[in-house]
Amino acid sequence: MSIHYTRVLRIFSFVLLILAAAAVSAADEVLRIGVVPQFDARQTRMIWQPILHALKEQTGIRIELVGSPDIPEFEKQVMAGEFDLAYMNPYHLLKANEAQGYMPLVRDVGRTLFGIVVIRNDSPVTDIHDLDGKTVAFPAPNALGAALIPRAEFGESYEIDILPLYVKSHSSVYLNVVTGQADAGGGVQKTLQSQPEHIRNALKVIYETPQVAPHPLAVHPRVDKETSSTISKAFLQLGITQEGSALLARIPMKQAGRASMVDYEPLKEMGLDRYYVQ
């Protein structure tokens, strides 16, 4: 065997080792996903862990759920680009796109998102104007349907001043209203419907906000396009099976479909920047 051939063989073997190591590294890579904490941590994990397991079964891609103690902390993590994937509210997406380049992959195309304002069944409040000077519970200042749009509506459309009480989750909002810690509370229909029956039955909706495209699952630009496409296709595939649809319904997501930034352009015309809390 010539010295030249031996040298070529060694170089070729070295290249193969590098490619093999890269393949192992890619296979071992774990993507991090953040989920806006509309529910408590236990419920969020119960909803999302089976979905992430199903996605891994389809794609081989491992996705780790990273918890956030509350919505403001989740916002900080998103704006810092800590998540490879993130399920966030539509206004978070606009800000995250500006800050980090996050792009939406999929969303629920079977419904729209709108906020609600709830009061106790026995409350003397009969109209939004009655909340002037009253305590209104919200999960966080920038929770889109549950706080940001209602606060903008209160200030711009109804010209009332409320006393905001931020309580970290939608579930806590409803509990604070039921127990009388707040005169009213902001939420969204899907989280109200997920509450225990005795909570739901103690509340009534007195207001609904304008409707917008719902929460997207978005991806950070550092995730390569092939991986993003694989995850998107797998997510959509889940939605066309009976078992997968049942998993997505717990988010809840009625009908999974592709999402784009165009879906969220109308939000820019709603004047929400004046009420967004940095």
Image (tube, grey):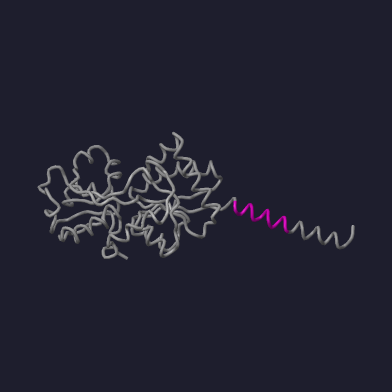
Q: Quadrant of residue 196?
A: top left
Q: How many marks?
A: 0
Magenta-highlighted residues = 15-26
Q: Which image quadrant: the N terminus?
A: bottom right
Question: In the drawing, does residue 51 fall left or right of residue 185?
Answer: right
Name the spot of residue 81 as percent of width and height, x first: 45, 61
The residue depicted at 23 percent of the width and 59 percent of the height is: 152
Whether 29 is among the magenta residues is: no
Name the spot of residue 229 as percent of width and height, x first: 52, 50
Q: Which image quadrant: the C terminus?
A: bottom left
As drawn, which residue projects farthest toward the right?
Answer: 1
The residue depicted at 64 percent of the width and 56 percent of the height is: 22
Whether 25 is among the magenta residues is: yes
Name the spot of residue 164 as percent of width and height, x first: 21, 58
As drawn, which residue projects farthest toward the left?
Answer: 124
| In-front residue for pair 203/104 | 104
The residue depicted at 28 percent of the width and 54 percent of the height is: 139
| Magenta region, main secondary structure | helix
| In-front residue for pair 223/63 | 223
Question: In the drawing, does residue 31 fall left or right of residue 211?
Answer: right
| In-front residue for pair 257/39 | 257
As drawn, which residue projects farthest toward the top?
Answer: 242
Question: In the drawing, does residue 20 fall left or right of residue 102?
Answer: right
